[in-house]
């Protein structure tokens, strides 16, 4: 485990880590030991020129988990910072890294592009868990993530993208990646973005063609009844977007009784044959909608957990469903 969470690291701190490795490789044993040839003058510098460092590294314990969350390095030099981390992975964990946490670092879209290209080319072939939440890289960053998901050189299973200012255009990009045959993601967190109904329609179509997805979090995304109707729709391949899901979070959106009834249609168990957990809290379903859902529940034999608490009043409703 390499853990530099919430240490206030800036790009300058990342440079100091490299300097520490140069000065005393025992100081960073099993992490970045042997990294003593970092050339920051080139945007894609590597350590390949130092054969001794590479040989020394092979004698170290391989890193499986790297955590850099809640630092500051993306504020000033996002691309340079990600390049440094990519090079650290390239030397110390390219064949062993399973989890990488870069959340809450203000990483920009170009920085995400650097990481996506590296991973898409097989830079960390064993990586299963990637956390990029809280970076606010927007739709362009989502496009880079989508390109990564289409690469046959990645094996991502958990993808955290919450709180990144991803709107409907970014959702369109992500939909292309999710629908790709190369996508292996089983847990996707898109909470606290703004994909809206347009983005939800695109993501729903992608989920209908995805076979790996099991758990999705779409909470707080400005999704209304139109978006929910897309989730309940059966597409041309005969499957619906919910066909493989076991857990779905749609809390803190703009779903009314109309959307809820569409979701709990007469063929719910056929539309969502594996769905065990559904979260609809903090929407606009209100008392009448909850009663209708209650009447439909007996036909939902697979569903084990349903959350409907804290529904918003009519006066709080937005214009998403008008």
Image (cartoon, rainbow, N blue to C red):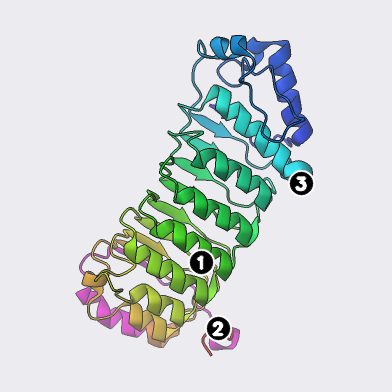
Q: Which element carries disc 1, helix, strand or loop? A: helix
Q: Is residue 125 left or right of residue 88?
A: left
Q: Secondary structure at mark 2?
A: loop
Q: Nearer the viewer, mark 3 or mark 1?
A: 1
Give the residue at mark 3: 75
Residue 58 visible somewhere in the drawing: yes
Residue 86: where, in percent of width, then height? 61, 33
| Residue 122, placed above or below residue 314 | above
Circle count:
3
Residue drawn at x 43%, y 33% is 126
Identify the mark at residue 172; answer none if there is no mark: 1
**Horizontal and vertical percent for residue 5?**
63, 36
Q: Find the magenta span and give its range.
A: 290-317
Q: Is residue 42 rendered magenta in the image? A: no
Rendered location of residue 67, percent (x, y): 58, 35
* Element type where label 3 sits in the image: helix
Q: Name the residue rendered at 26%, 80% in the picture.
A: 296
> Could you tell me how far apart the alpha carbons at marks 2 and 1 are, in whole angstroms?
19 Å
Query: Residue 320 shows which numbered tag?
Result: 2
The Cα–Cα distance between marks 3 and 1, rounded to whole angstroms, is 27 Å
- Whether the residues at callouts 2 and 1 have beta carbons within 8 Å, the answer is no
Residue contact between numbered discs 2 and 3, judged by CB atoms under 8 Å: no
Question: Answer yes or no: do the residues labelled 3 and 1 have beta carbons within 8 Å?
Answer: no
**Which residue shows up at 62% across the image and 15% down it?**
34
Q: Which class describes the residues within 10 Å of circle 2: few (<14), some (14-19), or many (20+)? A: some
């Amino acid at each position: 485990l390499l853990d530099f969470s919430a240490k206030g690291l800036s790009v300058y701190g990342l440079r100091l880590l490299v300097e520490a490795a140069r000065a005393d490789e025992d100081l960073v044993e099993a992490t970045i030991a042997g990294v003593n040839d970092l050339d920051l003058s080139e945007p894609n510098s590597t350590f390949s020129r130092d054969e001794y460092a590479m040989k020394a590294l092979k004698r170290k314990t391989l890193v499986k988990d790297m955590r850099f969350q809640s630092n500051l390095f993306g504020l000033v030099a996002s691309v340079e910072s990600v390049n440094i981390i990519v090079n650290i992975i390239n030397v110390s964990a390219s064949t062993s890294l399973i989890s990488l946490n870069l959340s809450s670092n203000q990483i920009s879209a170009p920085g995400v592009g650097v990481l996506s290209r590296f991973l898409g080319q097989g830079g960390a072939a064993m990586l299963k868990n990637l956390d990029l939440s809280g970076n606010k890289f927007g739709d362009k960053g989502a496009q880079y993530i989508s390109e990564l998901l289409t690469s046959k050189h990645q094996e991502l299973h958990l993808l955290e993208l919450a709180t990144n200012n991803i709107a409907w255009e970014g959702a369109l990009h992500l939909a292309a990646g999710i629908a790709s045959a190369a996508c292996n993601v089983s847990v996707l967190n898109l909470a606290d973005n703004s994909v809206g109904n347009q983005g939800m329609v695109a993501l729903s179509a992608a989920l209908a063609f995805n076979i790996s997805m099991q758990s999705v979090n779409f909470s707080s995304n400005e999704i209304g009844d139109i978006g929910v109707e897309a989730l309940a729709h059966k597409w041309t391949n005969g499957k619906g977007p919910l066909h493989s899901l076991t857990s779905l979070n749609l809390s803190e959106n703009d779903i009314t009784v109309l959307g809820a009834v569409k979701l709990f249609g007469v063929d719910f168990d056929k539309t969502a044959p594996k769905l065990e957990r559904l979260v609809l809290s903090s929407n606009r379903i209100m008392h009448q909608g909850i009663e209708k859902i209650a009447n439909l529940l007996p036909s939902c034999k697979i569903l084990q957990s349903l959350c409907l608490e804290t529904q918003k009043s009519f006066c709080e409703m937005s214009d998403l469903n008008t």
